Image (cartoon, helix red, strand yellow):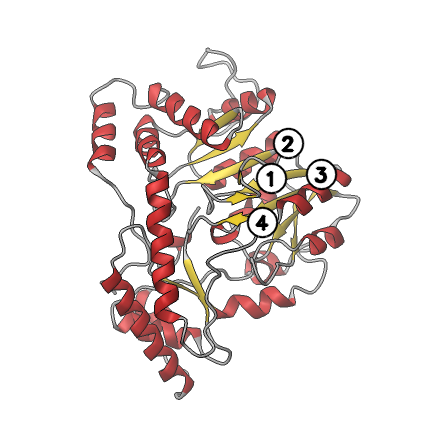
Amino acid sequence: MNMRIPLSAPDITQAEIDAVTNVLRTPNLCFGPELAAFESALARYHSVDHAVAVSSGTAGLHLALITLGIGRGDEVIVPSFAFVAVANTVRQVRAAPVFAEIDPLTLNLDPSSVERAITPRTRAVVVVHTFGVPAQMDALDTIARRHRLALIEDACEAIGAEFDSRRVGSFGNMAVLGFYPNKQITTGEGGAVLCRDASHAARLRSLRNQGRSGDDWLDHAEPGFNYRLSDLACALGRVQLGRIEEILALRSQAARRYDALLKDVPGLELPLLELLRRKLSWFVFVVRLPGGVSRNQVQTAMAHNGIATGRYFAPLHQQPAYRARPGTAVESLALTEQIAPRMLALPFFNRITQGEQEEAADALRSAIDHARHSPPQVSVDKLVGNSEASYLDD
C-alpha cells in the first residue's frame, strides 16, 4: 500500500545534486578526492584523528570488531533493543553477543546491566546511542576501562548528538556512523568508522578494500572485503554534513511540534525533548502506546489513512536467529520485553510539514481511541507487506 505520508524521506537539495553531478564529469568515481574530503570533514566534525568511509554502518561495525581483535570464544555486550546489525556483526566474527538491559528513560544500555553481564570472556561493549539520544558515556567508559574492554560506539542514529558537550563518536576506541536514507544525513548507502589510532585506521582502510596493502592493487596483506564507498556517495555526504546544523534544527522543530500535538493523549508516552547533560539528535519520533492498546490495530488504522508507521525495535534476544543460541542473555530483560511492543515510530523527516504532522497526530489519536474499544483486527503486515526493512536498515 502506498503511503501519502511516508515514515522517512531524504532531504536532497540542488547543492547535493550538483556535487554528485560534478563527480560524474570526472574519472574519479571511486577513491577520488571526494572520499578524502568526506573523511576529513567527518574526522574534524567529531574531533577525532581518523574517519574511514565504508559501504554501510553494518560494514563499519564488522570492520571495527575485526580491527579490535574480537573473535572466536569472545563475548561482546550489546543491547537487545537495537537494530540487528549489532548482534549479526558479532556473530560474523565468531564471537557471542550477550544482551544487556536498557535504561527505561533513554532506551540506551543500562550501565549496571552491562556490569552484571561481564564475564572472563567479555572483550568489548557496543554502545548504541538509540534514536539519537546519547548513552551514559561516563559510566560506560569507566566500566570499560576498569575491565579493560574495548568500547565501540554505534552512533548510526545519532550524528550531532552530544554528551557533556562532547559529540558522540568521540568517546570509544572506535565509533560507527550510518548514512542510510532515513538517517539525519545520507549518502544513499554508506557509513564510516571513527578512531584515533593510526594503525587501526590503516587496517580499516585495508580491510574495506579486499585487504590490500600499499599501492599495489594486487598485493593483499590479509583477507578483506569490498566495503568501499564511492566518490558519488561521498560527494553527497560531504554536502549533507555541511548542512547538518540546519538539518538537526529542522528535526528538532518537528519533534517539538509532535510534542505539542500529542501531549494531551491519555496514556501516550512521548520522548523527552530535553535530557540532562545531553544534546539530542532526532533520528525518529517514537511514542509508547498506552498499555493494553494493540500496536497492530493502531498501525492498520493509520495505514488505511495512508500514514506510514514503524515498529522500533523487536528485541533481538527474542528473534529466531538468536533465541535458540547460547549466550544471548545473562539475565532477565524484562524492561526491554515490556517496552518494545509499545513502541511506534511516526512519520518523521527534515521537510515534514505541520499539516502532515497534524494529520498523523489526529490519525494516531483516533486509532488509539478505536483500539481501546474494539477487538483485535488484521495485522498491519497484511496491508503494507514486509516493508519494515526499507526504513530500519543501517
Question: Dot 1 lies on which element?
Answer: strand
Question: Dot 4 lies on which element?
Answer: loop
Foreground disc of the pair 4, 3: 4
Q: Is the residue marked by circle 1 packed among few (<14), some (14-19), or many (20+) residues within 10 Å?
A: many
Marks 2 and 1: CB-CB under 8 Å?
yes
Residue with the mark numbered 4: 135
Quadrant assignment, res 323 = bottom right
Horizontal and vertical percent position of residue 388: 38, 58
The earlier-in-sequence mark between 3 and 2 is 2
Task: Please give the name of the residue rendered at 32% of the width and 75% of the height, measured from the top-left corner.
Answer: 301
Q: 327 left or right of 371? A: right
Task: Please give the name of the residue rendered at 30% of the width and 73% of the height, measured from the top-left corner.
Answer: 363
Residue with the mark numbered 1: 152
Q: Amino acid at mark 4?
A: Ala
What is the CA distance from the residue labelled 3 to the residue labelled 1?
A: 10 Å
The earlier-in-sequence mark between 2 and 1 is 2
Q: Can residue 147 be seen at all in this image of the molecule?
A: no
Q: Is the residue marked by circle 4 packed among few (<14), some (14-19), or many (20+) residues within 10 Å?
A: many
Q: Can residue 184 be seen at all in this image of the molecule?
A: yes
Q: Quadrant of the N terminus?
A: bottom left
What is the CA distance from the residue labelled 1 to the residue labelled 4?
A: 12 Å
What is the CA distance from the residue labelled 3 to the residue labelled 2?
A: 10 Å
